[in-house]
Amino acid sequence: MIKKLVPWWIEESIPFVESLLRKDMIVYEYGSGRSTIWFAERVKKIYTVEYQEKWKNQVEQWAEKKNLKNIDIVFCEQKPSRPYCQTINRVKEKIDFLIVDGRNRVECYKTALKYLSDKTIVVLDDSQRSKYREVKELLLKDKIEKSWSAPLRDNGKRSKKTSVFYDNEKE
């Protein structure tokens, strides 16, 4: 028996994300992990890329133990970054839900744009980081942001933020 696997995001964001999911959704995830398994239990298909082979293997073990057959996971070293970001090119359908939680998040989001629709929901983890400002600005042109913050375990000097960007009609 394996423990309950949930995304490693701000805990309060998870019920909101779950409320947006449908069983027929196609998900793409930059940065595999516990969230990969969590999504696979709730959607039609999840494509994901991981840059740490050990972590990719762990996700595959969890999926096998849970008999999940709807995960398409690939390993891709992060350097150079372009191949990592372009792993989304293997998907032949529109993405309903995009998780940007791996490396090179700005480039990954820009690469993913041609696979997204106006209705695609996007999770940007660690969205408090200034280097992701460009992604947030692009998303806020036509989406609503809902975010959650919590202090990091460094005496509360810094905080972590998980943001979900979704279509105006969902509000």
Image: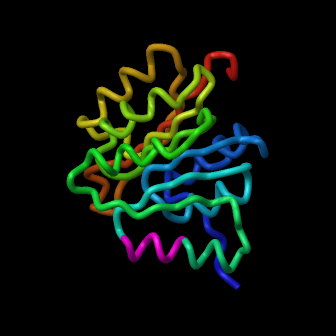
Say which quadrant the N terminus sits in: bottom right
Rendering coords of residue 61 (x, y %): 58, 79
- The range drawn in magenta is 53-59
The chosen color scheme is rainbow
Describe residue 166's horizontal placement relative to residue 124 as left or right. Answer: right
Residue farthest left in this picture: 80
User: Quick one: 86 or 21, which is closer to the camera?
Assistant: 86
User: Quick one: 95 or 7, which is closer to the camera?
Assistant: 95
Q: Is residue 33 magenta?
A: no
Say which quadrant the C terminus sits in: top right
Residue farthest bottom in this picture: 1
Rendering coords of residue 169 (x, y %): 68, 16
Q: Residue at x 38, y 52 (%)?
A: 102
Q: How many discs mark residues in the rendered view?
A: 0
Q: Residue at x 59, y 29 (%)?
A: 120
Vertical placement of residue 41 versus 117, above or below: below
Rendering coords of residue 32 (x, y %): 48, 60
